[in-house]
Each structure stands twice: as C-alpha cells, then as structure tokens.
C-alpha cells in the first residue's frame, strides 16, 4: 500500500486563462498569471493498493458519483503510467473554504491530487513536472504548485506548465478581499464557457491580442512593485475576458446585478483615495486586490454595502506542500509494477 498527502492553495488569475487550443491536453490559447492565496485550500490523501478493485473518490467525507470519479480516474491513469503502477486508488480530499459559496476550487483540488500521488508513489517530480501534471487535470491547477505569483506559459504538451514569477516577496504586501455573491442563475462552467467563447465569440481575437500585451504590463508592474499598474491591468484584463462572453453565440455572462454593484463599489472606494481593483472569474463573485496597509479601511468601506459574512480576506498562499500521513509510504515503488 502506498499513501501520500499534500495541501495546495487556490490561485486567482490576474491575467486570465480563457480558452484552449487543445481540449484533451489542456493547452491554453494564452499565457496567464496568478496570485496564490491562503484563504482556500485542499488537502488530499491518495492511497494506492493492490487489493483495491476500483478507484474511489471522497470529497469532504462523501463518496462522489461515478461521473466525478471517472474524471479523477482519468487523471490517475496519467500518474499510473508515469509510475508504472496499475493499482487502483482511494482518494480522500478535503476542501477548506470559509463558506459554501461556490468557491471550492478545481485549481487547489487538482494540484493537491497531483502532490498526493507524487508523494504516495515516490515519484520525486520537480515543480515543473508537477505543474505539467496538474495542468492535465485542470488548467488553472498548474499555477497552484507555487506560492506567490505564477505564470502559466502556454507551450506544447511537454513545455506547458507554470513557473514562479520573481517578485522579491512583494506579494506579502498584497491582499485580496472576496465579495461572495449568491446567484440563482444557472452557471456555465469555465470549461464550457471558454469553449463556447473560443468557438463563437467575435471578440476572441481581440482578447488574445490584449492578453499578450497585458502580460507584459503586469510583469513590469511586478518588477517595479507598482501597485497602481498591477491593479489597473488586473481589472482591465478581467473586463476584457468577460467582454468576450457577450459576443459568444449564444451570448452569456457571469455577472449578476450584485456583481455590478460590487464593481461599482470598488470604483467608488478607489475614487475616495483607497487604491483597490477588482477581478472576476467564471462566476458572480468579485475579488478585490489591494495593499495590505489599506485592507482594513477597504473592508470597512465594503461593509457599508455588503454583509460581513460576504467578505473574506485573503493574503498570499504558499505552494504545494507534502504532509505527513499516519502510515507513511515507503519511498520506493519497486513492488508497484505490472500487477
Ligand atoms: O483561472 O477547463 O482551470 O485563469 O478561472 O479545468 O482547464 O477551471 F475565469 C476563468 C479557469 C478559468 C481563469 O479555468 O478550466 C483563470 C478562469 P479547465 P479552469
């Protein structure tokens, strides 16, 4: 029996990944850049054993459906091939999220799974190899291998992974405030949303041109530790990503009236002299990027418009971490071959 455990934090893209050029391999149409955050994370234990007859997947103690397990099995197959191992696995994941507001993240989930399997099977994969592996589970997961800023370089199957963006620890001065917005609207998953956009949006070509320029701008902002430049390009990039969905066929949006209210609120706080900028992903929640020194004032200003329970403060998170298991696996996989 081989057992390993790992923790990965979620990340929020400041320059978004939006669109695949290869659906099966999960190769993106553009580079993206993210900040890993401490507020949400996943801890996963992977156990591989000869006596297991099938893969099983438990999330927060609840056994998941055949369909959800199938997705995990497809990912495990990649690892089994890499490890030359044919044992079935028991996967136990726990999502640590402050509330059940649709924030459970595939990024932290797939990164933690890659890490747990790496530990269990003693693969000793490098960060880049782990990132490449996590990418094949969910694109954004490849950035959660790292703490701080990470850039996913689109590359080819062999070279598409994330790397750490040097920042001289500037990320420690930053905060992100999540504004949780409950929405009754039927959600379009990021996977379906980006596919529809790539295939049908007349704005998609413009997105790609803009994203390449935004990436250059944000890297310069990080080098210069220029918060205004960082915030401006983050907010503008999110708006451009969301604009593509309006020109898709059929058109759709992730924005709800409350999202618009939150965006407006951020603009007002900014006009009052507190630097802060928003970003949004494939859902109605709004995330506010600010400097740590202003976080309490901004939180207070947001509290005039949103309930305290809707606001979650996050700081920079660390990279993928191996955790001890009760029953440590031997660090060799010699016996796990061709059963
Ligand atoms: O995180 O189809 O990774 O860069 O969050 O699993 O590869 O869930 F706003 C959208 C994340 C997309 C931007 O997509 O998709 C970002 C998004 P998958 P993901």
Image (cartoon, grey):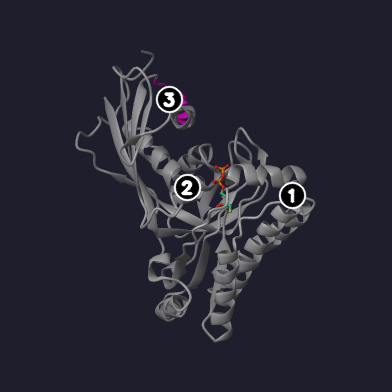
Q: Nearer the viewer, mark 1 or mark 2?
A: 1
Which x, y percent locates residue 133? 49, 37
Instruction: Farthest residue to the front: give it.
Output: 184
Magenta residue check for 193 = no
Residue drawn at point x = 28 percent, y = 32 percent? 3
Which quadrant would residue 214 be assigned to in this image?
Answer: bottom right
Number of marks drawn: 3
Give whichever of 275, 29 is nearer the camera: 275
Q: Is mark 2 within 8 Å of ligand 1?
A: yes
In the depicted structure, whether residue 332 falls above or below residue 289: above
Q: Is residue 209 visible?
A: yes
Between the residue at mark 1 and the residue at mark 2, the CA separation in whole angstroms equals: 25 Å
> Label 1, on which residue?
248
Q: In this figure, which residue is indicated by the disc labeled 2?
A: 107
Q: Residue at x 48, y 40 (%)?
A: 134
Magenta region, residue range: 75-85
Say left or right for 217 vs 324: right
- Identify which residue, 244 or 246, lies in the foreground: 246
| Residue toward you, 194 or 66 | 66
């Amino acid at each position: 029996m081989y057992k390993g455990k790992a923790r990965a934090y979620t990340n929020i893209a400041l320059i978004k990944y939006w669109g695949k050029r290869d659906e099966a391999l999960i190769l993106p149409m553009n580079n993206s850049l993210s900040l890993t955050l401490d507020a949400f994370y996943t801890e996963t234990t992977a156990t591989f054993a000869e006596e297991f007859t099938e893969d099983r997947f438990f999330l927060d103690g609840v056994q998941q459906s055949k369909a959800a397990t199938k997705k995990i099995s497809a990912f495990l197959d990649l690892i089994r091939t890499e490890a030359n191992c044919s044992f079935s696995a028991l996967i136990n994941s726990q999502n640590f999220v402050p509330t059940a507001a649709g924030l459970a993240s595939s990024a932290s989930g797939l990164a933690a799974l890659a890490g747990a399997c790496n530990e269990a099977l003693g693969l000793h994969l490098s960060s880049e190899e782990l990132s490449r592996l996590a990418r094949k589970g969910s694109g954004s997961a490849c950035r959660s291998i790292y703490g701080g800023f990470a850039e996913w370089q689109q590359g080819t199957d062999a070279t598409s992974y994330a790397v750490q963006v040097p920042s001289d620890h500037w990320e420690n001065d930053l905060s992100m405030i999540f504004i949780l917005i409950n929405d009754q609207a039927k959600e379009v998953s990021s996977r379906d949303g980006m596919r529809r956009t790539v295939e049908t949006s007349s704005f998609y070509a413009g997105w790609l041109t803009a994203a390449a320029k935004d990436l250059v701008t944000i890297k310069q902002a990080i080098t210069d530790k220029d918060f205004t430049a960082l915030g401006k390009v983050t907010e503008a990039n999110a708006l451009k990503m969301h604009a593509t969905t309006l020109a898709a066929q059929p058109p759709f949006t992730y924005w709800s009236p409350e999202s618009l209210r939150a965006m407006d609120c951020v603009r007002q706080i900014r006009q009052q002299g507190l630097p802060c900028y928003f970003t949004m992903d494939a859902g109605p929640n709004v995330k506010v990027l600010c400097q740590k020194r202003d976080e309490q004032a901004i939180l207070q200003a947001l509290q005039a418009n949103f309930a305290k329970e809707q606001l979650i403060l996050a700081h920079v998170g660390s990279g993928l971490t191996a955790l001890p298991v009760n029953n440590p696996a031997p660090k060799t996989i010699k016996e796990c071959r061709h059963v």
